[in-house]
């Protein structure tokens, strides 16, 4: 008997809620909300989206562990990528941001000032990797390459206190294009892989894969994305010098795997492809040791998804099969191979 009055009691609230939803849906359709960048952005809008972004990043990064960020080679790699794609908007120890960056709405933060009072941690990693919606901050081009993102975080950790001369050296500002990271003749710099030991055929195939986004590397995808076929051919011919680097004879675990593989686990001998003079395969002897570790770990963890035109062959050689929970090479074996081939 009392159900009718009870319903009438709550009816105004229900009607009000429905009306509010309808108004929220209709107002954007009227065009009354001003989205002109020339008029700036409301303070309340800045606060709302800024707070929402900060809280979202804090929540999603809370469980991330922070690795050692003191590796000099990682800082150098981070500096190179920062100069390539970040400095134009955020500035650097060597220069202020470009004028257009100040006209963006919202404007990108000047990281030389911001990072001086904020030590990078998992939140910065999450921001660099995933980007921020409703801003000009993009996601990292390769979501697989956490190692590259941590390199960037390592660089940001020291950037604010870095003299311009040191930044100029780390970012390769005194060198042009590919040479800024890989050396004038592709000899490497202790942070980026050597190119001079490779063939022009291999380098061209790698650059095409990076340009197409079919090989995973946020840094190289950014560097190669606008290269023309002619530029790829010219760069490959310049850096692909096929420099011979010998490997000392030894009886180490790395030498054993390189020469004979792991027959009991059906893992192929590395030398059969990589040291046989076949131009389509990358040479390993003389390559940067840490680079070799990273690439083998990527194949172990991601298999063919690591990308590249020879990824399927590498996966079969390593026996990284879908039904296996993890790759067949242990960390000890990867380190042994890197020590055998690398410099």
Image: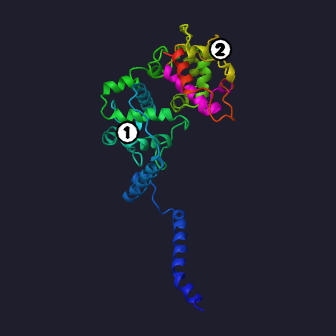
Looking at the rendered image, the quarter that the N terminus falls into is: bottom right
Q: x, y percentage for residue 57?
A: 45, 49
Q: Give me the disc on residue 99.
A: 1
Vertical placement of 262 versus 47: above or below? above
Q: Is residue 227 visible?
A: no
Whether the magenta-drawn stretch holds residue 313 is answered as yes
Q: Is residue 164 visible?
A: yes
Residue range (magenta): 289-315
In terms of sequence position, does the residue under pointer 1 or pointer 2 come before the other?
1
Circle nearer the viewer, 1 or 2: 2
Q: x, y percentage for residue 99?
A: 37, 39
Disc 2 target residue: 260
Residue 291 horizontal side relative to residue 266, left or right: left
Q: Secondary structure at mark 2?
A: helix
Towards the viewer: 156 or 135: 156
Whether the magenta-drawn stretch holds residue 245 is answered as no
Residue 186 horizontal side relative to residue 301, left or right: left
Q: CA distance from mark 1 to mark 2?
A: 58 Å
């Amino acid at each position: 008997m009392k159900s009718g009055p009870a319903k009438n009691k709550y009816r105004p609230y229900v009607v009000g809620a429905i009306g509010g939803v309808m108004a929220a849906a209709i107002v954007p359709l009227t065009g009354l909300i001003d989205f002109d960048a020339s008029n700036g952005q409301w303070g309340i809008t800045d606060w709302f989206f800024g707070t929402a972004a900060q809280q979202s990043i804090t929540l999603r990064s809370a469980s991330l562990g922070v690795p050692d960020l003191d590796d000099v080679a990682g800082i150098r790699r981070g500096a190179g990528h920062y100069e390539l794609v970040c400095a134009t908007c955020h500035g650097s120890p060597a220069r202020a941001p470009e004028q257009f960056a100040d006209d963006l709405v919202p404007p990108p933060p000047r990281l030389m000032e911001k990072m001086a009072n904020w030590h990078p941690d998992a939140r910065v990693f999450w921001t660099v990797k995933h980007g921020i919606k409703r801003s000009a901050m993009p996601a990292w081009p390769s979501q697989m390459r956490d190692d590259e993102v941590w390199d960037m975080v390592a660089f940001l950790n020291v950037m604010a206190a870095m003299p311009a001369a040191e930044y100029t050296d780390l970012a390769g500002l005194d060198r042009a294009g590919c040479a800024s990271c890989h050396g004038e003749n592709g000899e490497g710099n202790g942070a980026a892989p050597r190119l001079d030991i490779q063939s022009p055929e291999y380098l061209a195939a790698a650059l095409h894969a990076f340009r197409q986004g079919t090989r995973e590397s946020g840094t190289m995808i950014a560097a190669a994305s606008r290269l023309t076929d002619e530029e790829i051919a010219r760069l490959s011919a310049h850096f692909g010098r096929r420099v011979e680097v010998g490997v000392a004879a030894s009886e180490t675990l790395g030498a054993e795997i390189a020469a004979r593989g792991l027959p009991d686990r059906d893992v192929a001998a590395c030398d059969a492809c990589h040291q046989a003079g076949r131009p389509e395969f990358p040479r390993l002897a003389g390559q940067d040791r840490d680079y070799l570790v990273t690439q083998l770990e990527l194949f172990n963890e991601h298999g063919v998804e690591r990308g590249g035109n020879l990824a399927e062959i590498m996966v079969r050689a390593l026996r990284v099969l879908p039904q296996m929970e993890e790759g067949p090479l242990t960390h000890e074996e990867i380190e042994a191979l890197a020590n055998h081939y690398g410099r």
